[in-house]
Image (cartoon, rainbow, N blue to C red):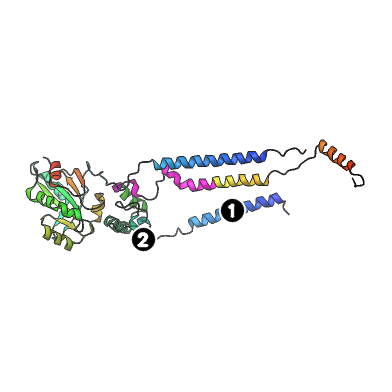
Amino acid sequence: MTEPAPDSGRKAMSSLQVVAAAVAVVVVAFIVLLATRDVQVNQPSLALVGQNVPQFSGTSYDGKTFDMNSVLLANRELTQADQTWTVINFFASWCGPCRLEHGDLTRLDTEGAACPTRLVGVTITDSAENVEAFFEDLGGEWPVLVGDTSGTVIDFSVLAPPETIVVAPSGLVVAKFIGAVTYERLVEVISC
Amino acid sequence: MLSASKSRTMSWVLMALVFVAALGYGATADRGPRSDQERAAALSSSIACPQCTGQPVSESNAPIAETIRTQIKQQVDAGLTDQQIVQVYVDRYGEWVDLNPSRSGLTGVVWIAPFLVIGVAIGALALAFSRWRGPAETQRATAADAALVQSAQEDRPGEPS
């Protein structure tokens, strides 16, 4: 009988299988590692709380101007009892929850809190006319910044209206509320 | 003339050269200066809309997406680099808004993974091809074979041996 041919065929096939198996193991490990990683997606960023409030300024729908820095500088000249807290409400006239919380904000504006508090609104993709109509309809006397507010909106990591930020007289951000707020929740964080 | 195996090697080398040249050209050809509009559009496609599920701001009608698109245009006009602009949004919203996977850490592997896969595939194919061609099978007749043939020839008289 002829000698059987050298066994290279079978050896090469098994090394191919080894390569395929190794690749499969690596791919599966890769998939498992990536799938189980903790990725924060679409979560509102609360990183601002505990930091200094970003500087911002603008013009209200009724023509008045507002500048955050001026408020903080003025606070430095005042006694602690007179220093004002600032509540920044990111808002839009087309936003449903904004209508829901408007009563609570109006109550804060008129009744106040334990400490002097000023309210300022910042619109997101809205127009002065709509804001004016909204406030005529539902009341409220605080300045609402209109125009190009994109820088401010991004600086405060806002996802969508309504979001409300409470700033202490020193400029420290003490709370960020995502969604409609209530009067009770706001006064709870304002203490002097 | 070249021998068969030499010309085979030559064709592989030639093919590799063409492959590398084409890859190089394709990767560097359209590196001309991009207009501001192109830059803004490219950046808008690489920043996720924070409020949406995985869509870039270029594809979303959400107000925050519109706001970010406006700001990207302003930043491009103001002369910020692409990296600076992306960093603004990563700082405000988190690493996840950058739709290009980060280049460091475990996710960085995805950038070279295609090349690794191609390399492994080529290696595996080369291994498979070598198996099919097989080493030249030179069967050598053994002494027992020669004896068998001899006896068969003797059994058949009249046949030329």
- Is A138 inside the magenta-drawn segment? no
A105 vs A36, nearest the viewer: A36
- Quadrant in which the N terminus of chain B is drawn: bottom right
Residue A57 visible in image:
no
Vertically, is B54 above or below A19? below
The x, y position of residue B129, in whole percent, is 63, 47
Residue occupied by mark 1: B17
Vertically, is A4 above or below A152? above
Check if mark 1 and mark 2 are on a common chain: yes
Query: How far is the residue under mark 1 from the one under mark 2?
Result: 36 Å
Residue occupied by mark 2: B36
A129 vs A63, nearest the viewer: A129
Q: Which mark is residue B71?
A: none
Q: Residue at x 33, y 49 (%)?
A: B97
Q: Relative to B16, is A57 on the left or the right? A: left
The x, y position of residue B36, in whole percent, is 36, 60
Snapshot quadrant of residue A82: top left
**What amino acid type is highlighted by mark number 2?**
Asp
Magenta region: B91-119
- Is B96 inside the magenta-drawn segment? yes
A13 vs A72, nearest the viewer: A13
Q: Relative to A61, is A46 on the left or the right? A: right
- Quadrant in which the C terminus of chain B is drawn: top right
Q: Residue at x 60, y 39 (%)?
A: A14
Residue B34 visible in image:
yes
**What amino acid type is highlighted by mark number 1?**
Leu
* Mark 2 belongs to chain: B
Q: Residue at x 20, y 55 (%)?
A: A96
